[in-house]
């Protein structure tokens, strides 16, 4: 049994806070769990907080991009928040620009971004 | 290329046998980089490169080892890691070093990306015998 | 005590026509320096040096490193440092010492063998002093350069807050790869520290960029986006625009504005601030 990261829910939004360096299997579990939860809880938004992560390699980067794509298919939006400057510089150098992923500086701004997107969607 | 290990400081050997080992290797490289006083960005680049290469060793090389330690050359200090496996080797190195090319369903950024993140990069591979990748990040 | 004797001879050469020699030395030097050093200042410097030199020789100094020369060395150090700071060349600085040799040349014309010997010995001492001057000059120059380089790096990385949630880096001067990297890391950190979602990189003051610098700018913009912030580049000069196109650098998806003011307007609009111009304005 490998570890699973708890997924919180506030309203229509799922929130995941990654607090420690993840094993590859845990990363894959998270991707699966999120897909399940978006459907089970009919969530419209997902926030993944990676502010505590000191490195993001291509494996985690790919998971972030995949979750963003999966959520789009399931009519939800994903916002990745809190990426550190050193991590961002490294990811760009690595060649990973996470094209389709929305980002925000912190959790609060991430929530605001989801709300803005939701209200503009209604109009 | 053999790394110019700092005299009196033996590099340590870590196994790469299962995916949980990657976490330990990242931790070990982080400790080394901090001791060496790499800048925060350089630490992050070195750890990320090590993570990519360790995963390559595991997935494509069928497991192996990494030797990591501090290095010195001409008054400069740095952190080095040597990834070694006795897997199938890489038949076409040039192709493997190309962004986006992958044989294992990854993003194809492992080798080429890791090379961009470090100062010294050396790849030595013999088809059928294995692959050795050496990376070094120098303190600026 | 042969040494003692020759020392007296050296002093003798310098003291024969005491006033005259120092004066013609000053004349000789001021001729080469022009008006860039004040007459009075030069007069004081060289007279002090002259007296110190005579005194050192009287005490039996035989070369520049002798203990008796410490006063001379101190004066020369001060002189070289001043010249270096004022922007004189090394030869303009060393000429102050070497000119003394030329001033003494007339003595040789009908001088005895003794005088010639003394002149040569003094010449060697003056050569030593001249080299010492150049060394001190170079040292001072090196110190100046490294101090300036440090200042430049500090000066060149101001991240300023223009508005709530809008920061800017006005870049000035030629960018090299190392400096660009420093500035960009600082900009990204400032995004976190100030919680800003808008960043403006103003390159009005940058005369030219090369491929590497342009790549660094691009990477920073992508990195900022990964962190959840948007970057605008303002003040791209026509030359830089041509370089970017000529080098084939992909600037797609990068927002550019002609001026910092336009970039600020855009940043404010993006952060939801409405700008309203009141009719008639308020005085």
Image (tube, grey):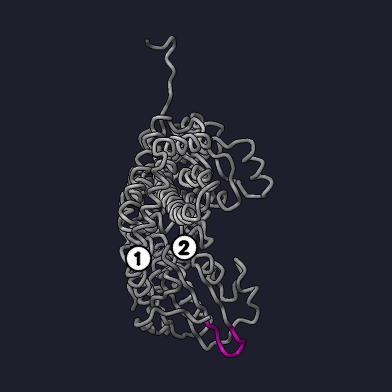
On the image, the x and y values in percent for residue C233 come to: 52, 40
Q: Nearer the viewer, residue C41 or A4?
A: C41
Towards the viewer: C188 or C279: C188
Residue located at (47% from left, 60% from top): A91
Q: Is residue B95 visible?
A: yes
Determine whether C166 is above or below C277 in the image: below
Q: Would you say residue B60 sits in the magenta stretch?
A: no
- Work out how far the residue at label 2 is from the one at label 1, CA to CA, in angstroms: 26 Å
In depth, the one of C109 and B72 nearer the eye is: C109
Residue C185 in view here: no
Residue plotted at (51% across, 40% down): C173
- Give neighbour class at mark 1: few <14, some 14-19, many 20+ (Cα, 10 Å): some
Quadrant location of residue A1?
Answer: bottom left
The answer as to whether the residues below labels 2 and 1 share one chain is no
Q: Which of the chains bears the disc numbered 2?
A: A
Q: Is residue B49 left or right of residue C56?
A: right
Range of magenta residues = B125-132
**Crowd around label 2: few <14 · some 14–19 · many ≥20 (10 Å):** some
Residue C196, image x, y percentages: 38, 42
Q: Which residue is mark 2?
A: A61
Closest to the camera, between mark 2 and mark 1, is 1
Disc 2, disc 1: CB below 8 Å? no
Residue that mark 1 sits on: B37
């Amino acid at each position: 049994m490998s570890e699973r990261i708890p997924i919180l829910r506030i309203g229509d939004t799922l929130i995941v806070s990654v607090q420690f360096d993840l094993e590859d299997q845990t990363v894959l579990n998270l991707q699966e769990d999120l897909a399940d939860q978006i459907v089970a809880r009919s969530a419209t938004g997902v926030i993944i907080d990676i502010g505590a992560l000191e490195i993001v390699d291509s494996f985690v980067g790919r998971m972030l991009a995949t979750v963003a794509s999966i959520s789009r298919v399931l009519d939800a939006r994903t916002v990745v928040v809190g990426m550190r400057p050193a991590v961002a510089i490294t990811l760009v150098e690595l060649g990973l620009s996470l094209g389709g992923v929305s980002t925000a500086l912190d959790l609060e701004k991430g929530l605001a971004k989801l709300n803005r997107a939701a209200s503009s969607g209604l109009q | 290329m053999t790394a110019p290990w700092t005299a009196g400081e033996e590099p340590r050997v870590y196994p790469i046998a299962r995916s949980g080992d990657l976490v330990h290797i990242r931790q070990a490289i982080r400790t080394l980089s901090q001791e060496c006083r790499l800048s925060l960005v350089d630490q992050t680049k070195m750890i990320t490169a090590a993570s990519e290469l360790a995963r390559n060793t595991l997935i494509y090389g069928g497991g192996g080892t990494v030797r990591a330690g501090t290095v010195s050359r001409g008054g400069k200090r740095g952190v080095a890691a040597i990834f070694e496996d006795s897997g199938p080797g890489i038949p076409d190195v040039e192709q493997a070093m190309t962004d986006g090319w992958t044989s294992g369903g990854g993003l194809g950024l492992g080798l080429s990306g890791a090379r961009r993140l470090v100062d010294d990069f050396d790849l030595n591979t013999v088809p059928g015998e294995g692959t050795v990748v050496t990376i070094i990040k120098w303190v600026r | 005590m042969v040494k003692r004797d020759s020392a007296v001879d050296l002093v003798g050469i310098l003291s024969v026509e005491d006033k005259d020699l120092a004066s013609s030395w000053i004349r000789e030097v001021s001729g080469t320096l022009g008006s860039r050093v004040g007459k009075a200042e030069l007069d004081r410097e060289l007279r002090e040096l002259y007296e110190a030199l005579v005194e050192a020789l009287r005490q039996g100094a035989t070369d520049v490193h002798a203990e008796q020369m410490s006063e001379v060395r101190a004066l020369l150090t001060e002189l070289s440092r001043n010249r270096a700071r004022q922007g004189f060349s090394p030869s303009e600085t060393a000429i102050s010492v070497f000119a003394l040799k030329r001033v003494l040349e007339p003595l040789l014309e009908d001088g005895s063998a003794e005088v010639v010997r003394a002149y040569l010995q003094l010449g060697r001492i003056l050569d030593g002093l001249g080299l010492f001057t150049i060394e001190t000059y170079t040292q001072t120059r090196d110190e100046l350069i490294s101090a300036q380089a440090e200042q430049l790096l500090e000066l060149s990385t101001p991240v300023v807050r223009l508005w709530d949630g809008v920061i800017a880096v006005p870049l000035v001067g030629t960018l090299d790869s190392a400096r660009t990297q420093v500035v960009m890391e600082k900009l990204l950190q400032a995004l976190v520290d100030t919680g800003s979602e808008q960043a403006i990189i103003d390159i009005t003051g940058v005369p030219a960029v090369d491929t590497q610098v342009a790549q660094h700018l691009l990477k920073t913009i992508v990195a900022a986006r990964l962190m959840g912030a948007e970057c605008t580049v303002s003040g791209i000069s026509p030359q830089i625009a041509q370089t970017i196109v000529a080098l084939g650098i992909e600037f797609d998806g990068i927002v550019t504005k002609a001026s910092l003011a336009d970039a600020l307007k855009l940043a404010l609009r993006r952060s939801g601030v409405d700008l309203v111009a009141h009719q008639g304005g308020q005085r």
